[in-house]
Image (cartoon, rainbow, N blue to C red):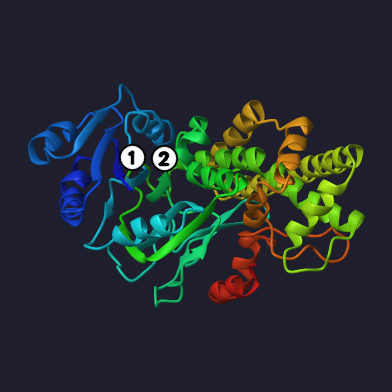
Amino acid sequence: MTTEIVILNWNGEAFLKRYLPPLLKSVEGLDGVGVTVADNASEDGSRKLVASSFPSVRYIQLNRNYGFAEGYNRALKKLDADCFLLLNSDVEVADGWLHPLLEWMELHPECGICGPKLHQTDNRDIFEYAGAAGGYIDKYGFPFCRGRVMKMVEKDDGQYDIPEEVMWVSGAAFMIRRELFNSLGGFCKDFFAHMEEIDLCWRARLEGWKVNVVPRSTIYHFGGGSLPPDSPYKLFLNYRNNLAMLSRCLPQTVALDYAFNLIGEITDPDDGPDFFGCCCDEYNRCDDELKHSLADTAAILGLKKADAVIRRRMLIDDLAAVSYLFSGRLKKFLAVVRAHKEFRSTRHKTTEKQLCRYIQRALTGKQLEIARNILTDEPLEGNWLSASFGLKCIWSKWVVLQAVLKKDTIFAYVNKTLK
C-alpha cells in the first residue's frame, strides 16, 4: 500500500524548518511512502527552503490561497497513492508514529479514514484541542473529543489507548483512502477551513465506511498555525461551517434512523442479533408500494427533524451572539451574525426524492454497512417519533450544557453515557 504524506503550507516557513526534519527521518527506509508540500501561494521563503534544504520533498505550487479544503482538493488531484495522509505544517512526529496507521489501514479494509492521538507540543502528555483521541458531535452538532470537551483537556494516562470507532478524526493528521476521497468529491470547498474534515468523515460514514482513531500512534500539534484561537474570522468559519455540515449530513442520518424504526414498528422483524439484517429482509419482502411508502415517510420525517435541530442550533448561536454583544466583544458578535447570514444564503438543500433514493439504497441489503456504521446496535425504545438520536458517535445530549453542569467530571460522564 503506497502512502503520500501531504503538508498544506501557507506562509509556514518556520514550521517547515522545524518539523520537516523529524518527519523525513521518521519515514526513512519505508517503501511506498512519499512526502509532498502543497503550497497555498505563500509569500515567505517556504519554496526556497524546501528546494534548498529538503530536495527529496515534492513541492506543489498553487496559484492562490484556496484554504484547507480546496487547497487539499487541488493538491491531491496531482498525486497518485493508495492512501493520503494529510499533515499540518505545525505537527511534530516521532519515530514509529506512521507504522500503526499504515498497519491499521492494511488490516481493516472497512476503515476509510483513521488518525492518531494528538498531544500538545509544549505539554507533551496533555491532549491537544484539535482532535485529542478522536471526535464525536452532540445532538446540535457541537464537536468534542475523547480527551477534550469544550476548552477542557485531559492528561493522557492511557485511558483512550484502545482503538475506537469515532465520528471524526482531526485534519491535523488525517489518513484517508484515495478511492474514498475521490468518490466523495474531496472536502467541501465552500468550507474554506475548519470542520471540513468532520463533514468528510460524516459523509464517509453515510456511505458505509468506518472512521477510527489508532492510539498506538501519537503526534504533537502546535495548533493555531494559520489562525489564532481567538480570531473572529475563525469563529465565523466555525459557526457557518457547523451549520453547513448539519444541513449536508443530518437529513440522511436521521432519515435512516427513522426508516429502521419504522420497519420495526410495521413489520415486526425477528428479535435476533442482527436487527439491521432482519429489517432489510422484512423490507425486501414488502411490495413495491409499501417499500416506497416506508422510504418516503422516513424521508419526510428526517427532513423535518433535521430542520428542527438546525433551527434550535441557530437559536443557541443567537444566544451566544447576544452574550458576545453584552460583554463588549463586538467583532465576535458580528462574526456569528455574518455566519448565519451566509449559511442562509448558501444552505445546502436535500430534497425528499434524494433522501428516498438514499434510504432505498441503504435498505437493499447490499449496503448494510451504512446502517451498521450510523445506527446503534438496538432500535430505539418507546415512542420512536419523539426519541433522541439512536446514532453512533452522536451524543443525545447538549455538550455545552453538560460541560457547565459536570465541570471536572464531564469526561467520565461522556464515557459512561455516549453510545
Q: Residue furthest front?
A: 285
Where disc 2 sits, the SS reads helix
Q: Is residue 99 left or right of residue 312?
A: left
Q: How many marks?
A: 2
The amino acid pointed to by label 2 is Arg
The amino acid pointed to by label 1 is Ala
Q: Is residue 20 left or right of residue 166?
A: left
- The one nearer the camera, 133 or 32, is 32
Q: Residue at x 59, y 53 (%)?
A: 142
The C terminus appears in which quarter of the rendering? bottom right
- The one nearer the camera, 358 or 10, is 358
In the rendering, which numbered label is found on residue 81? 1
Q: Position of residue 130 (x, y in %)?
A: 43, 55
Above/below status of 138 relative to 405: above
- The one nearer the camera, 84 or 218, is 84
Above/below status of 298 relative to 215: above
